[in-house]
Amino acid sequence: MRNLITDVRGVRVGQAHDADAATGVSVVLFERPTVASIAALGGAPGTRDTALLEPEMTVEHVDAIVLSGGSAWGLAAADGVMAWLASQGRGFPIGALRVPIVPQAILFDLLNGADKPWAKGGAEAPYRRLGAEAAAAAGVAFSLGSAGAGFGATLATLKGGIGSASGRAATGQTVGALVAVNAVGTATIGEGQHFWAAPYEKGSEFGGRGWPASISPDDLALRFKGGTGQNTTIALVATDAVLTKAQCKRLALAAHDGLARALRPAHAALDGDVVFAAATGHSGAPSDAFALSELCATAADVLARAVARGVHAATALPFPGAKPSWRDRFGG
């Protein structure tokens, strides 16, 4: 176990970024067409081709899922991923053609201090290129923190980033999470070093600091970043279980509990919190509703840990006024 979403059999991750623009793309590739669904509980999501993930829709499988910076410009990343998949002969068969199925969610990183000339009409956005590069780079190992879709991500008080974690449910099936943490609020308690997700930490995967001795009213005071449209936490949870689209929908909904455990606030009107769920089907179906509930609970715990790992691993952007990283403020 690498403690990454790629511990789920059939899942690969590739990432690419533009350092000058402080933005990037993370691509989850599935080794074979995979059942998936989605739950969007934030007030301002930005997505592409996600309606087909609802249980009543016809298309049953996806080839990849994309998480990207760039706000609406970032939606072009899926074009690059589709082009790469088409070159590999992947996609939904329609006559003699194949159409790659690549749902996507984006986050807002346009105001993180880096120049985004395309947002002023002065250049072409890099996301199609970054999407193709990320797809081509997909493998079992990848970086956390300031990488991929999390390269330019921020929170109210700290630098955000890309996080991942994995675990095994009591059923024996593997669950993993990938998340780009760009929340309107905080992942840490008050102004201190302790993560809201601390009770779910395995070992010292995000510093091992635990919870503080007490939590004061000031610690519970909400801390907000920016304004409307400047925030979103986007994630994917995956399992090697055999699930239907309806069961994947239930998994995505339950995994949102992980965001609520790791971020304060979550699912705000100012956030576009989105969670995809995918089932690669390598380990068999859950035996009953209780086994499915075990998978759902594990997914929430794993996503909470992934959020904290993404913030813990991040490095600050090299721009005036940039948010400090957790390590800048609290040590290694």
Image: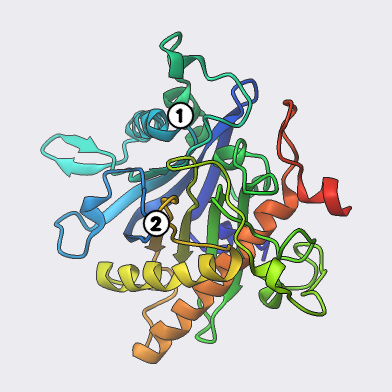
Give the x, y percent position of residue 171. 50, 85
Mark 2 crowdedness (10 Å alpha carbons): few <14, some 14-19, many ≥20 = many
Question: Dot 2 corresponds to which residue?
Answer: 42
Give the x, y percent position of residue 156. 63, 49
On the question of residue 240 being in view, the answer is no
The three-letter code of the residue at mark 1 reads: Ala
Q: Quadrant of residue 242?
A: bottom left
Closer to the camera in the image, 223 or 50: 223
Q: Quadrant of residue 127?
A: top left
Q: How many marks?
A: 2
Mark 2: which secondary structure? loop
Mark 1: which secondary structure? helix
Closer to the camera in the image, 183 or 13: 183
- Residue 199's place in the image compared with 80, above or below, is below
**Spatial distance from mark 2 to mark 1, Cα to Cα?**
28 Å
Give the x, y percent position of residue 212. 80, 74
The reply to whether the C-beta atoms of the residues labelled 2 and 1 are less than 8 Å apart is no
The three-letter code of the residue at mark 2 reads: Gly
* Residue projecting furthest to the top: 122
Q: Residue at x 37, y 33 (%)?
A: 75
Q: Residue at x 32, y 32 (%)?
A: 86
* Residue projecting furthest to the right: 331
The disc placed on residue 168 is none
Give the x, y percent position of residue 30. 42, 51
On the question of residue 39 being in view, the answer is yes
Q: Residue at x 54, y 61 (%)?
A: 177
Q: Quadrant of the N terminus?
A: bottom right
Mark 1 crowdedness (10 Å alpha carbons): few <14, some 14-19, many ≥20 = many
Question: Dot 1 corresponds to which residue?
Answer: 132
Name the N-terminal-most of marks 2 and 1. 2
